[in-house]
Amino acid sequence: MVVTGMVMIGRYFERKLAIEANLRVQKIDVYDDFLKELAQLFHREHNNDDLIDFITLWQGKLILWSESETLLALFHWHESLMTTEERDHSLLMLDDFIRAMREEIGHSSTAIERGAFSHLMINHGGFSKSMLAPCKPATIVIDTKISRYFTTHPA
């Protein structure tokens, strides 16, 4: 009787781990699609209709596959894009969203400074310097450790 119970408990946990692994693979695909599209957004000419179609489909996948914390990070980033003109704040919200995605698939970002992911995408992701040159210098720096990442200088 005890052995049968142990086998059933073992199978339950095996099944639970298999389901979690499958969910993680699905989430990785969804997050990878987003990060690829975000990185390419500034690399190529894009049709706004295509971008809107992508975001609409992608948000549906995100709602289905993501946990609450990741969705909240997306909402905060989206809200910052719509309500603020400070580039630093919006980039920090993007960074928080990337951190939430990473945490959800099992990666820790605690050793990485806040703002580092946005810095990587902007400075090493093919963003055009000509796009950043006309930007005004940031007026508000939320975290002084990241000011070196986002302060823009006139060309």
Image: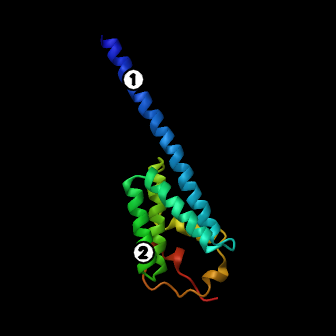
Work out whether 90 lies above or below 61. below
Seen in the image, is 155 located left or right of residue 116? right
Q: Which residue is drawn at 38% across and 62% down?
A: 72
Question: Can residue 57 be seen in this snapshot?
Answer: yes
Q: In which quarter of the image is residue 46?
A: bottom right
Work out whether 79 lies above or below 36. below
Mark 2 secondary-structure assignment: helix
Crowding at dot 2, Cα within 10 Å, few <14 / some 14-19 / many 20+, comes out as some
Distance, label 1 to label 2, CA atoms, is 46 Å
Q: Residue at x 69, y 71 (%)?
A: 44
Seen in the image, is 119 located left or right of residue 124? left
In this orientation, which residue lies closer to the viewer: 55 or 91?
55
In this orientation, which residue lies closer to the viewer: 20 or 133?
20
Look at label 1 and name its amino acid: Gly
The residue sitting at the left extreme is 1
In this orientation, which residue lies closer to the viewer: 28 or 149?
28
Pointer 1 with pointer 2, Cβ within 8 A: no
Look at label 2 and name its amino acid: Ser
Residue 96 point in image, percent of width and height? 44, 64
Q: Which residue is drawn at 46% across and 50% down?
A: 65
Q: How many labels does the image show?
A: 2
Crowding at dot 1, Cα within 10 Å, few <14 / some 14-19 / many 20+, comes out as few
Q: Name the residue under label 2.
A: 80
Mark 1 secondary-structure assignment: helix
Tell me the quadrant of the picture where the C terminus can be found.
Answer: bottom right
Residue 27 point in image, percent of width and height? 51, 49
Q: Which mark is residue 10?
A: 1
The first of marks 1 and 2 along the sequence is 1
Q: Which residue is drawn at 30% across and 10% down?
A: 1
Question: Can residue 111 be seen in this snapshot?
Answer: no
